[in-house]
């Protein structure tokens, strides 16, 4: 039997033993999540290694339910005698807390129907990525960044190569047992430059994948980081105006992230969401169709079950602008009196258009391409937002001068109705998989 198999069996056995101990100590129900994570991070800065870190962590998180009371505890001390004491104390702690009759494990019916599709989340060649390979990629990224035209303005280049192998095991006392192994690989580069006025703009590029062979080369990442940063030289505030806004696929994830909290069961039940009570209503523009899809092979949000053990399902979130569902876990499902969906998103799958970013920009006579958001905030209760933006002015379908230190503000309930185009280019390095988005008549505050 291989060392990996031994480790897997050990961690699963630990999760199962936690359940047995909790029941023996007086818990009515229990849920144990055991994990083992190996992470390697190599950082290269200005021609030499800056940091090398390698760590392996193991632990267990235990939820205990006793006398309509509930507690969650965690530990990295997995010795049998230590677990016995730790779990006994956890049950005592739970019984000392206030009652909450809604706290319980999910209905076992929600475990049923789990897909068996191969998600290909683990790279079988994970162990072949050596320290020498990581250093080679990091050096390539710096070399490529410094080879970009105008690189004499570069002050510093930092590149990172990291990879992670994760094993997770979830056991619930009412009949659920599940496990998963996955790998991730990321390469990034950050560049800082000196502008003529003394400012020091920074920008970056990154990419990642479940399988090492699908990660773009260090040269590609470094070149993009250099080009993005050097393009920021001379950025100024543009004139205040209402015009088209194109958000590139990497930056558009920031706008979408502001919707996730208000879609949660907690926000809905506590009436802290501007989307509360709007199921079945036309909340967004007709161009917005989003499916929560946990079954995309090798994607970052893919899964067979969520962190409660609820079987993953593909389901609509928004269809042609109509809000179809929330993210509701078993606890808030009970409080709201509705069937749980899941407490968290998997992958967002968009109804895509037929043009990429450059083609969409070419169709804009006067506007701004937003490549990044700077600070700002979004109020989950009211939907009001205010954000700093940076990017490039669009004139006659072409990118013109860089702009920065400008602001946009509005309300999500109105803003998303102005979406006029969706790109065909979902950002592959995030579970939100956002494409380029084009909004009409956005008010920019500048000079």
Image (cartoon, rainbow, N blue to C red):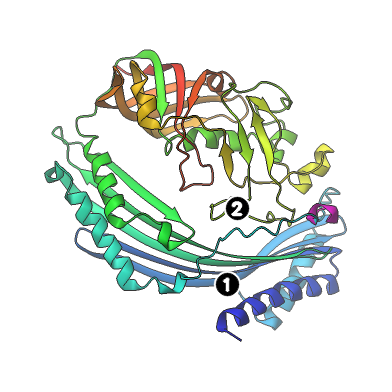
**Residue 101: image x %, image y %?**
86, 49
Taking the view exactly as shown, the residue that stands out farthest to the bottom is 1
In the rendered image, is residue 97 in sight? Answer: no
**Residue 37: image x %, image y %?**
53, 68
In magenta segment, residue 146: no
Q: Quadrant of the N terminus?
A: bottom right
Q: Quadrant of the C terminus?
A: top left
* Residue at 34% in and 23% down: 362
Q: Main secondary structure of the magenta part?
A: helix
- Alpha carbon distance from label 1 to label 2: 23 Å
How many labels, in total?
A: 2
Position above or below: 57 against 266: below
Taking the view exactly as shown, the residue that stands out farthest to the front is 354
The quarter of the displayed image where residue 92 is located: bottom right
In the rendered image, is residue 286 in sight? Answer: yes
Please name whichever residue, 170 or 102, is drawn nearer the observer in this view of the structure.
Answer: 170
Secondary structure state at the residue bearing disc 2: loop
Please name whichever residue, 255 or 81, is drawn nearer the observer in this view of the structure.
Answer: 255
Q: Which residue in the structure is indicated by mark 2? A: 302
Mark 2 neighbour density, 10 Å: few (under 14) some (14–19) many (20 or more)? many
Left or right of 198: which side holds 336? right
Secondary structure state at the residue bearing disc 1: strand
Q: Earlier in the sequence, mark 1 or mark 2?
A: 1
Q: Which residue in the structure is indicated by mark 1? A: 58
Query: What stretch of residues is rendered in magenta?
Result: 106-111
Please name whichever residue, 217 or 260, is drawn nearer the observer in this view of the structure.
Answer: 217
Position above or below: 128 against 156: below
* Residue at 31% in and 51% down: 221
The quarter of the displayed image where residue 172 is located: bottom right
Please name whichever residue, 373 or 252, is drawn nearer the observer in this view of the structure.
Answer: 252
The quarter of the displayed image where residue 169 is located: bottom right
């Amino acid at each position: 039997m291989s060392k990996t198999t031994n480790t897997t069996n050990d961690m699963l056995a630990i999760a199962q033993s936690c359940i047995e101990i909790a029941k023996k100590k007086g818990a009515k129900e229990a849920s144990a999540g055991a994990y083992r994570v190996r992470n390697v991070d190599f950082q290269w800065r200005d021609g030499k290694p800056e940091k090398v870190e390698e760590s392996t962590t193991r632990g267990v998180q235990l939820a205990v339910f006793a006398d309509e009371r509930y507690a969650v505890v965690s530990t990295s001390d997995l010795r049998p005698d230590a677990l016995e004491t730790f779990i006994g104390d956890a049950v005592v702690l739970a019984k000392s807390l206030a009652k909450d009759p809604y706290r319980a494990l999910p209905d076992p019916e929600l475990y049923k129907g789990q897909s068996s599709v191969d998600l290909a989340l683990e790279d079988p060649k994970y162990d072949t990525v050596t320290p020498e390979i990581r250093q080679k990629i990091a050096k390539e990224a710096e070399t490529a960044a410094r080879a970009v035209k105008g690189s004499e303005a570069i002050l510093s280049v930092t590149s990172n190569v990291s990879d992670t192998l994760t094993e997770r095991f979830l056991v619930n006392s009412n009949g659920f047992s599940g496990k998963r192994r996955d790998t991730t690989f990321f390469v990034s580069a950050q560049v800082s430059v000196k502008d003529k006025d003394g400012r020091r703009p920074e920008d970056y590029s990154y990419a990642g994948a479940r399988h090492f062979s699908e990660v773009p080369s260090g040269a590609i990442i470094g070149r993009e980081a250099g080009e993005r940063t050097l393009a920021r030289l001379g950025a100024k505030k543009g004139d205040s105006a209402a015009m088209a806004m194109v958000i590139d696929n990497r930056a558009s994830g920031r706008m979408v992230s502001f919707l996730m909290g208000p879609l949660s069961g907690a926000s809905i039940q506590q009436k802290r969401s501007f989307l509360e009570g709007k199921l079945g209503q036309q909340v967004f523009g007709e161009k917005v169709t989003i499916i929560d899809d946990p079954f995309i092979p090798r994607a970052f949000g893919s899964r067979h079950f969520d962190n409660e053990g609820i079987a993953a399902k593909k389901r609509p979130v928004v269809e042609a602008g109509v809000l179809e569902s929330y993210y509701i876990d078993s606890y808030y499902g009970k409080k709201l009196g509705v069937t749980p969906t899941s407490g968290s998103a998997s992958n967002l799958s968009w109804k895509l258009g037929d043009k990429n970013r450059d083609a969409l920009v070419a169709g804009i006579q006067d506007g701004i391409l937003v490549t990044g958001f700077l600070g700002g905030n979004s109020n989950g209760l009211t939907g009001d937002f205010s954000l700093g933006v940076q990017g490039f002015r669009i004139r006659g379908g072409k990118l013109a001068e860089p702009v920065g230190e400008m602001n946009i503000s509005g309300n999500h309930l109105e803003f998303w109705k102005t979406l006029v185009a969706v790109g065909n280019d979902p950002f592959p390095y995030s579970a939100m998989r956002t494409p380029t988005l084009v909004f009409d008549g956005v008010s920019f505050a500048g000079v």
